Image: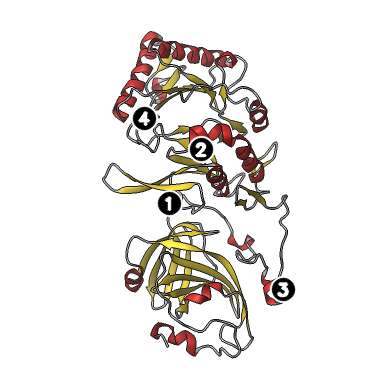
Amino acid sequence: MTKSLSAYNKKRNFNSTAEPIGKKVTNKKKHIFVVQHHSARRDHYDFRLEVGGVLVSWAVPKGPSYNTRDKRLAVKVEDHPYAYKDFEGTIPKGEYGGGTVMIWDEGFYECDGNAKGEIKTGSFKFRLFGKRLKGSWTLVKFKEDNWLLIKEKDGVFLYDDISSFDRSVRTDRTMGEISSGKQIKRVRNSAKDFLVEGVEISNPDKHIFEKPTITKYDIALYYKKVAKRMLPYLENRLLSTVRLPSGVGGEKFFAKHNFSSNSGVVKMMIPSKNGNKEDYYHITNEEGLISEVQMNSYEFHIWGSSIANIDKPNILVFDLDPDEGMSLSKIRQGVRDLKSVLDEFSLKSYLKTSGGKGYHVVVPIDKLKNWDDASEFAQNVAKVMEAMWPDKYSSNMRKNKRMNKIFIDWVRNTKGATSVAPYSIRLKDKCRVSMPIKWSELDKVGPADVTIEEAIKRLKRKNPWVGFFV
């Protein structure tokens, strides 16, 4: 009998329980984790991490929480055998842990240090890649077998309340169905679960916008429809997204990291200014795009360089940001003036709505050597406009320096800065799209005119940005 599993085996009568006998296994290439909802004398969640061929386990009474302010009690219990990851069923009444066990989540985890050594010291940081639990977490010991399970502040926040998940990730059964031994084959209702390109959208009826109501399902369907047009500008560029996990009225935040293990999402380690490396990511296909919606990402922002050479920008973006109350006619004139300056540099430019107050002018360019070149050139364009029309435009982002003027935002053209992607939804008061349009449409389409319905209709027209990648 394996020493670390002796306590587990001693507590169980394997003639009565269907739980697996404790046997250690050889280390796997990937360290798995499993969370099992356990309805015993006291309802709780068993949180298990594979370390050294066994499942090191904690009982978490309230279950994990994505709220970084929550410090969930996690009581360390005896190690469980690796095979316990597959256990879902009923432990007979009177036996140790008698009650119903559901596989609530499963996946794998990563850590930067030695898992066994860090657990021994009482502080263990790790990243989860599960179906329901993702991102960075910490287990901290504070007294004997009492630990705290804490979500790290990494921008990954998927759910407000885990109790809404009442079915097994393995068998799709409820606790009642598991208890009765019922074996089911559930047919998913498209009104309740949305499957596209292999990605399941949870909480599809969650409201993201009101008046009119637009749900998570609606947004996933929109991105599926525009994917063919959108992906050339999105794929293979580092991303940041705006996430809204709780829907209407909830907190939204900017996220540049992603711990999804879905196909089509690729992680990259990028050196930061202080010399450390940070996790960034990009998507490669439609499945990656839709999986981001599943992660509650609804607004997409892109770098100005591709992953092939992140230090050589190949897109410049100018955002015309008007002062409050400025007339649309003045904003449109600003767009024309900017285009005239870019024409003088023999640069072809493309126009899109911002989905907010102004317009974006986008320039594909291959003449820049590095980000210093990009930011210097973009700033010079803004300064030229400021010099030519000092009463209309400003290159200074300070509010008091641009009263009654349009700020020609050139700052997006620096390393690590992003701009909203073509065809992206904007998470503002109303659901609007940052939509590519023809120059001839400048006087016809306002900055916040394009809804998702209008954007989909426009897909039937000729692409207004034909030649962008030539």
Residue at the image point whose x is 39% and y is 75% from the top: 143
Q: CA distance from mark 2 to mark 1?
A: 18 Å
Is 65 above or below relative to 77?
above
Question: Tags 2 and 1 in contact by the CB under 8 Å rule?
Answer: no
| Residue 182: mark | 3
What crowding class fits label 4: few (fewer than 14 Cα within 10 Å), some (14-19), or many (20 or more)? many
- How many marks the image carries: the answer is 4
Q: Residues within 10 Å of mark 2 (few under 14, many from 20)?
A: many
Name the mark nearer the viewer: 2 or 4.
Answer: 4
Which residue position is annotated with label 1?
154
Q: Amino acid at mark 3?
A: Lys
Residue type at mark 2 is Phe
Which mark is drawn over residue 204?
none
Q: Secondary structure at mark 1?
A: loop
Q: Amino acid at mark 1?
A: Asp
From the viewer's side, name the closer residue of 186 and 250: 186
Residue type (three-letter) at the residue carrying disc 4:
Pro
Find residue 313 and name its label: 4
